Image (spheres, grey):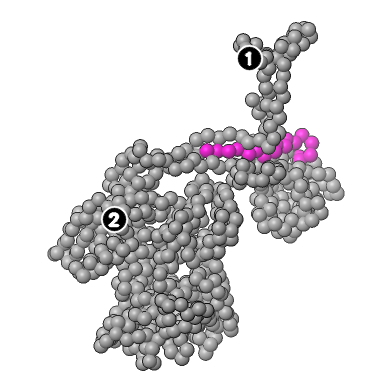
Amino acid sequence: MGGSVLHALIWRARSGMRIDRLGMMAGHGSSDPNYRPPRLPYISVVGPLNLELEPDRDPPRAIFIVIQSPGYLAGRDGMNAQVVPAPGTLHLRLDGDTRADVAIDFGPLAGSPLTDANARTAAALIETAIRAAVGSGGFSVAGTAVTDPARLAELQQTAVRWDSGRKRFVITSGRRGTRADPSTLPDATPLPVSRVETEPGASDLAPALGLRDGVFAADGRLARQKLATPTAIAVDIRLDLWAGSQQDLAALLEAWAHTTPTRTEVATLPALLAADVAANATQITLQREGDPLTRWSLLQLEPDGDFADRLSAEAPVLANGAALDARTLRLTGPATASLGFFHAPPIALPGLPEHPGPTGYALTVGVRADGPLAAGQTARLARLTAGARTVLQVTITISNGGPNLFADVTVAADQADGTAFTPVTVRLPAAQVTAGTDLHVVLDSTRFGLGVYADGAPLVPLVAVPELPAAVLPAGGYDLQLELGNPAGITLPVRITHLHLIGRPLGPPDPRLRRSLAAAVSWRIGDPINLVRTENGFTAAGEPSGAVVVGVDGDRLTLDRPLATAWRRASTLIYSRSLFYHQRQWRRADDIMNNLFRLSAEYRVSTFLDDPLPAVSAPLVERPEVEVLDLTRLRAERDVAGTTRRPDYPMPPAAASPSVRARIRSTGSSRDS
């Protein structure tokens, strides 16, 4: 409710408020009149300030979730009187059609009494052996090894537990959890079977584990749950724009007015695709972290997707030992990673840009030193070229500044005519590079030249750089080339964590923006999810495609229905709900003594109060069987039999009603109606 609204507004501010040459941050504020932001410029969000019901607003559509309870095989009670058996084989049949002969060796535990501790260890060994058999191709259907990734993932979830209350082993099928709604499947599609069985065979372990005689087997069941309809409410939020000058405040207001009209919508749980999605797909993979593309993005490399460009889907060429390792691109010695981008279109249409950054560039690169540091180590992080011209080049050199080590970052660039911009060198603590930092390089070819930021904060050049006497055109053109590392060799091993090149001199992003994405673990089963096209990375363009999350597995979400169209990774925004909000009023509240300029805007956001518990749960059946009984005949047969146990038949029906009743039995369910 309120938390998701605040997060949505802060994410919108961080992703949408990218201003030329100005580093802007956003975060939570406070209603205390003495509150001051941690830095300038800044956007703070305060709320909730008020909450009201909106009974006239239409609630969202009802959401139904189908849950598969697992089938299981519970062994014989009282196994604590037995001992851990010798090595043998457990012959399993799972879910009716998948079987395997699983070899199990209890090692030194064999012959020990089945105490609770020993039994839990034995159960873990059995489970490990089953999962090893899954990984090695030991499970088969009709003699053919199982290779389907989804089915293998189910088999990997097979669980073996020790029931300490009844002293028995229990094996549970991995086919459990949320399932696709059977009503969306073709009529001939059978419902999934969840079942565990043991079969006799050579060196059979089942009798010794109590899994043969005296067992209790139960098949899995499907249940359809309806989630409670959320309550429509309105939440009041205040947003403060803070700046150190009237001019910066005007720039903030202009940027906010462009990104946020007085009446618009905000997306909750914003997320990005880690890979393109094909039509009719029911699963999508999300990035764990990252920042959205802008209108001027030229190149973006992310660890989710193995550093393939999010715009072109082209992967960099790794050479001389460059490697992808632990979600980073590792460069050492002569290792390089290169990639071409901004290629000429096949048709030279009017209006298409021929220069990628006529007013300058912005390059954000995440870097972390890989290993101990020593004075004199150096590494060329990145070099962007247009033919023989250097568009941007970033180099790090470790220097000795007294008792502490520092990292000197030098950036250079050329103009279109080959004249070099004045290089800039800045200094930051070497420990910051060891821990990992986001370097942001800005080339403003209209006035200010080169500038460097680290984790969103501006760095002062070691030597002052004068402003440009006039606007110039930076190097650029079609068929640009990126080269990470240096084929001549680097002495400072580094790891690149991400890279984003923009054809405009935008200020640095908020360093918390990347971590504020809604990764897959942020989603719950039953959450609505929408995919929509986006042109600027943070607002929707066109109609969304909606679904419901029915499964979360690592970075992958499973949806309750197939997506009708394909979705490109670069131009897709994912969110849970789109909340309407409108501006109520603006207030000016400056603090001249502290040289603070502030504009406060109050908004009312229409949102929902969710109930995470299901409202209705009902079992599902595969095929109903209806038996029509003649009530009069049944009563007569009972009286003739003269049995002492008289069946309890219902009273005769009312006049003008048929003298029959229906008893409905369900295949796959134990309930009669």
| Image location (x, y in percent) of residue 640 | 78, 7
Q: Is residue 368 magenta?
A: no
Q: Residue furthest left?
A: 593
* Residue depicted at x 40% and y 40%: 58
Labels 2 & 1 near each other (Cβ < 8 A): no
* Residue depicted at x 31% and y 67%: 24
Q: Nearer the viewer, residue 654 or 580?
A: 654
Q: Residue 248 occupies which quadrant of the picture?
A: bottom left
Horizontal side of residue 185 vs 294, given as left or right? right
Q: Is residue 219 magenta?
A: yes
Residue 137 makes an appearance in the image? yes
Up-down relation of residue 579 to residue 305 (above or below) = above
Q: Residue 654 occupies which quadrant of the picture?
A: top right
| Image location (x, y in percent) of residue 422 | 33, 88
* Residue identifier under label 1: 657
Q: Residue 209 occupies which quadrant of the picture?
A: top right
Magenta residues, as a range?
209-226
* Residue depicted at x 74% and y 52%: 106
Q: Nearer the viewer, residue 350 or 377?
A: 350
Horizontal side of residue 484 vs 207, given as left or right? left
* Residue identifier under label 2: 262
Q: Amino acid at mark 2?
A: Thr
Upstream in sequence: badge 2 or badge 1:
2
> Badge 1, how many Cα within 10 Å: few under 14, some, many 20+?
few
| Image location (x, y in percent) of residue 74 | 71, 38
Label 2, secondary structure: give it. Answer: loop
Up-down relation of residue 482 to residue 456 (above or below) = below
Label 1, secondary structure: give it. Answer: loop
> Badge 2, how many Cα within 10 Å: few under 14, some, many 20+?
few
Q: Nearer the viewer, residue 661 or 247?
A: 661
Residue 461 makes an appearance in the image? no
Q: Amino acid at mark 1?
A: Ser
